[in-house]
Image: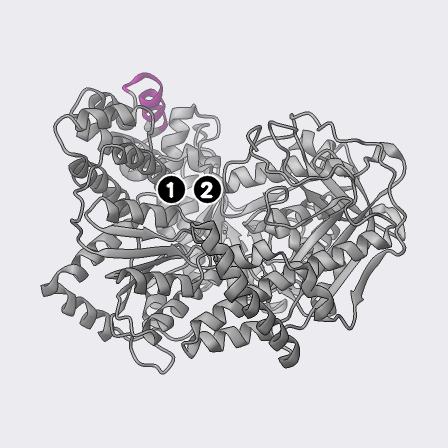
Amino acid sequence: MKRLLLGNDIAKITEIAREQVEGGAHVLDVCVALTERADEKEQMVAVLKKLALSVPAPVCIDSTEAPVIRAALEVYPGRALVNSVNMENGRVRIDAVLPAVREYGAAVIALTIDETGMAKTADRKVEVARRIHEIVVGEFGLPPGDLVFDALTFTLATGDAEFTRSAVETIEGIRRIKESLPGVRTILGVSNVSFGLGPEARRILNSVMLTHAVRAGLDMAIVNPSEITPYADLSDEERTLADDLVFARREDALARFIAYTAEKAPSAHRREEEEVAHGDPAARVHWSVLHRKPDGIEGMLDECLKTRTPVQVLNEVLLPAMKEVGDRFGAGELILPFVLQSAEVMKRAVAHVEKFLDKADGVTKGKVVIATVYGDVHDIGKNLVRTILGNNGYTVFDLGKQVPAHVIVEKAAEVNADLVGLSALLVSTSKQMPVVVQELHRRGLRVPVLIGGAAINRPFGKRANRLEDATLYPAGVFYCKDAFEGLATADGLRDGKRRAGLVAAVHAEDPAPPAGSFAPVVDQDSVPRSAVRADVPPPKAPFFGPRAVENLDLREVYPFISERDLYFLQWGVRPKDAAERTRLIEEEFKPLRVRLEKECIEQGLLVPRAVYGFWPCRSEKRDLLILDPADPSRTLARLSFPRQTGGKRLCLADYFAAKERGVPDVIGLQCVTVGSRISEVTEKLSRDGDYARSYHLHGLAVATAEALAEWVHRRALKDLGLPTNRGKRFSPGYPACPDLAQHVPMFGLLGATAAIGVKLTEAHQIDPEASTAAFIVHHPEAEYFHTKGVSD
């Protein structure tokens, strides 16, 4: 991190942050103070701006300087945690930091340190915590839940009598702080307890200390998940030895603990691994899933398949292993990162077993339509459900991800589905689930709906079971916490004797009261720059900054509609016979298009609005810096783009001049919409049962928005004095710039919300739907490309 900070390589810092989140981190502590630099404030602001756009985790702002903390809070768009305050110099630090914490709605960590030093006993920890609480909560008015106490712990490795009881005093301090100061939170740097010990000793001691601290009420832990072993995985001897040390039960506790970890047998985890390696193949597979060990899983499964059918391997070996993972998680013996790692092993194992499945034709336990709902691109959980249901005798129709409600309903009607399964990861996209339920009811389809995903819980399922008129969905909406519960629920609903009872049970539940975050990061910086010309003169922009386009006429926009996109993609005119396709377009869909275009003009269903503009810019490797027109030395936004690791090694940043050119380049930004009224109309048509008209109007709206984007793009090129076939426009979410979060700085620069009434959803999607935003690239060699490698 120090090297990257000294090199201003914020893009690489962002990659490290992503890796930490993918490794299990829930909060990122951000500290940029360096003795070699005097611009801590500027670096903190730059790093936080980048993290806010790229990393789906909150931050803890870590600085000893109050002005740095204030500057960070000013630019960070979410609620932050601040590290930290104490009373080492009385209330000086608190008075310096708390005004900004309160003003920007942050939470703050408070160390149990006062004028006499770090509190070492439980009594002193509580005493210091009370003093801080009186000031922070009593005087500054911070809610107790925004005050996070660090009771501090010290190493047990020295054998110093002064610290023999330090761990138990910390545990007791946590318990008493939580009891005496209701509502406050606690945090602890757990690994401090084992500082100075060997790796094996640290692994055991950290795990035991974490377990006891959590039991005492610890809310947050500073740990490396990969270096923590679940308490349940430790042997009885390891727990006893570590407990003796933590709770100071024996004078020789440290010596015995060190001797065991340094000289005696390996941990129970490794002993068990050695025993399993020579045992029954089914037991080895079970152990591998439970302990997150993917290596060699295929060979073990092949051995299992010699004596079991593929379905038996799935049902009798793999599913019980994953069930135990879920049971341990439910019991608090496994943390979420471990569960996810076990799921990865499970996915690999199931993929191998799938190769050997040969289900009998015409035999099915039921037909299930599953989908990840519209707006959500996450499908790992859905795919697992598909696999488990499919290989347990169900015929599964997987519609994929980001599936609109009407597509799910139409498929359910088409195949006469017995069940519908819906998945969502995001809170924002989970709102699509009740829409599907409502549409099934309006179509008269009495199909039970199974819902699940990270954003879903049982109270949500209860609410989704209520229709718009507050009556219950007759077939029932069933929340399934995982694929295993989904299978059990599906089996129950397909059992004639059990179905009525399950539906009655879910209907008997009172609805809850209404309510008030990667693929692995690839290091692309080592890939050489593409051969794209770097000497293209930048065009002269007629103005800098945004401009709204007023009084747009749809009749100017319609000619830019792509017939292929409208007929083939939006309206789905794709019969296999080419002659029939031509006939349908000429005789039915072209006349339909003419009618709908006229209606949209006459009834004001489509209201075209646009804003576009130009900014100076320059490139730095894979980054594009958008500069302040009034002060080109000031960066307004930094955008990062992926680079092909093969093929032409293309990257959007290559199309703009680097700093070495000495003269800034020019980038155009644009955002267009045809308004929200069309969404309201199509939604009403759908509710009224006029699905075809709703579908065709929706498709025309999307195609018109794309046509408007082309119209604005050509106008921008004309303003730059360039031919209309010069360069390209690229939109976030597409292969060359896949990060939808780049909509955020674009909207900020364009003032898109105020100018044309569009906004961004929590998932960085543009609302209304029939809207687009794009970068305008003037480079004559610009081309569309993927970023996966040579084949693209």
List the single residue furthest toward the bottom: 469
Q: Contact (CB < 8 A) between labels 2 and 1? A: yes
Q: Is residue 525 left or right of residue 517?
A: right
Q: Is residue 257 magenta?
A: yes
Comes first in the chain, label 2 or label 1 = 2
Which mark, residue 233?
A: none
Q: Which residues are magenta?
A: 254-265
Label 1 amino acid? Leu
* 380 shown above or below 750: above
Identify the main secondary structure in magenta. Answer: helix
Query: At numbered mark 2, what does the secondary structure look like: helix, strand or loop?
Result: loop
Q: Quadrant of residue 531?
A: top right
Q: CA distance from mark 2 to mark 1?
A: 9 Å
The quarter in which the C terminus is drawn is top right
Residue 284 painted magenta: no
Q: Is residue 235 visible?
A: no
Q: Position of residue 612 (x, y in %)?
A: 77, 59
Tell me the quarter of the image containing the N terminus: top right
The secondary structure type at the circle numbered 1 is helix
Q: Nearer the viewer, residue 554 or 157?
A: 554
* Left or right of residue 142, residue 75 in this image: right
Q: Quadrant of residue 530?
A: top right
Mark 2 Cα-neighbour bin, 10 Å: few <14, some 14–19, many ≥20: some
**Which sits in the foreground, 788 or 297?**
788
The residue tagged 2 is 24
Q: Which residue is mark 1?
A: 340
- Residue 476, position as x, y percentages in the image: 26, 69
The reply, left or right, for residue 351 in relation to residue 63 is left
